[in-house]
Image: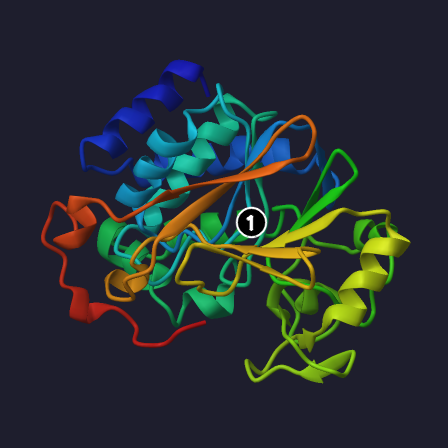
Amino acid sequence: MSTNDISEYISILKRGDCITESQLRHLTLTVKSLLIEECSVVAVSSPTSICGDLHGQFYDLLTLFETGGQVPDTSYVFMGDYVDRGHNSVETLILLLCLKALHPDRVTLLRGNHESRQITQVYGFYDECLRKFGNGNAWSYCVDLFDYFCIAALVDGKVLCVHGGLSPEIRTIDQMRSIDRQLEIPHEGAFCDLMWSDPEEISEAWQISPRGAGYLFGEKVTTEFNAVNNLDLIARAHQLVMEGRKYLFNEKLVTVWSAPNYCYRCGNVASIMMVDENLQQNFRFFSETEKSVHGGPKGEERNALQPYFL
């Protein structure tokens, strides 16, 4: 697949159309060949920009790049949950795959809990693929590719990026590296916990998560994990925060959220965490676009969204 082909795909997306099923298949195979060479915990050099959940809000993703800088001028780590909930999961994912194919060293794609077969059949992505391609083949190409997305990223050995949080089965980053990621996210265990867990101000080390998967973990767990692994910060996504970002545990952990006005009704702002060469963090904030305000250029019905927050 040539760079001209991929650049043309991006142009197609930006004018409100979609690539063909055959083009998507070739794109996923191209990106798979890149991802299969990456470690489960991929090393990233600063400066870089770290982003949280996107959830199919394609026009807000375009605003994200306008706010944070275009690839390849800016390096990005995306912490998962590209699909479901929004009207344009297909376009959101395809744009990120195109950028990964064009600039593999400038775009890091981590897996989120929504990058799974089971979740996408419930919360919108599967149905969107059926509407836009007429069958389930496109969905199959994408979910097969999800199995190759990295579990975590490590910026200069000091900032760990992961979608959800920590696991009682994981004490070191080396243990993360040893996880076999090329499979559907399990219902329990370390891989599941990294995708599903949440930080919480609790006195215990761990609590069962009300989500039904993963755990709640507190400051003691976070402080110990950072000390054992010589980390300055854990960056994660997975939870809506109205202000776009939220530090916890004496700034040992931060939640980054990058989908403004989530589900087109939450009223939150979104953020990008920019990490400079000295690992100092600065945030840029942005709000939803006019196209998102009105449900997209083709007048998609917002009441078709799944009314469940995950």
Residue at image coords 40%, 73% = 309
Q: In screen coordinates, is 48 left or right of 242?
A: right
Q: Residue furthest front?
A: 250
Residue at image coords 32%, 27% = 9
Query: Is residue 109 placed above or below 180 in the rendered structure?
Result: above
Residue 112 picture location, percent across and down: 55, 57
Task: Tell me if I can see residue 175 in this picture.
Answer: no
Callout 1 amino acid: Met
For the C terminus, the quadrant is: bottom left
Q: Find numbered disc 1 in the image and state the secondary structure of the residue it sits on.
A: loop
Residue at image coords 37%, 38% = 64
Relative to the observer, which residue lies in front, 281 or 131?
281
Relative to the observer, which residue lies in front, 200 or 79?
200
Instruction: Count residues near mark 1 (Cα–Cα under 10 Å), then give few for <14, some for 14-19, many for 20+.
Output: many
Q: Residue furthest right?
A: 228
Task: Tell me if I can see residue 236 in this picture.
Answer: yes
Q: How is the image coloured?
A: rainbow
Residue at image coords 70%, 29% = 278
Residue 152 picture location, percent across and down: 68, 48
Q: Which residue is mark 1?
A: 79
Q: Residue furthest left?
A: 299
Q: In screen coordinates, is 123 left or right of 164?
A: left
Residue 148 picture location, percent across and down: 63, 46
Relative to the observer, which residue lies in front, 160 or 92?
160
Query: Is residue 305 placed above or below 109 in the rendered structure?
Result: below
Query: Is residue 213 placed above or below 261 in the rendered structure?
Result: below
Residue 87 picture location, percent across and down: 25, 56
Q: How many marks?
A: 1
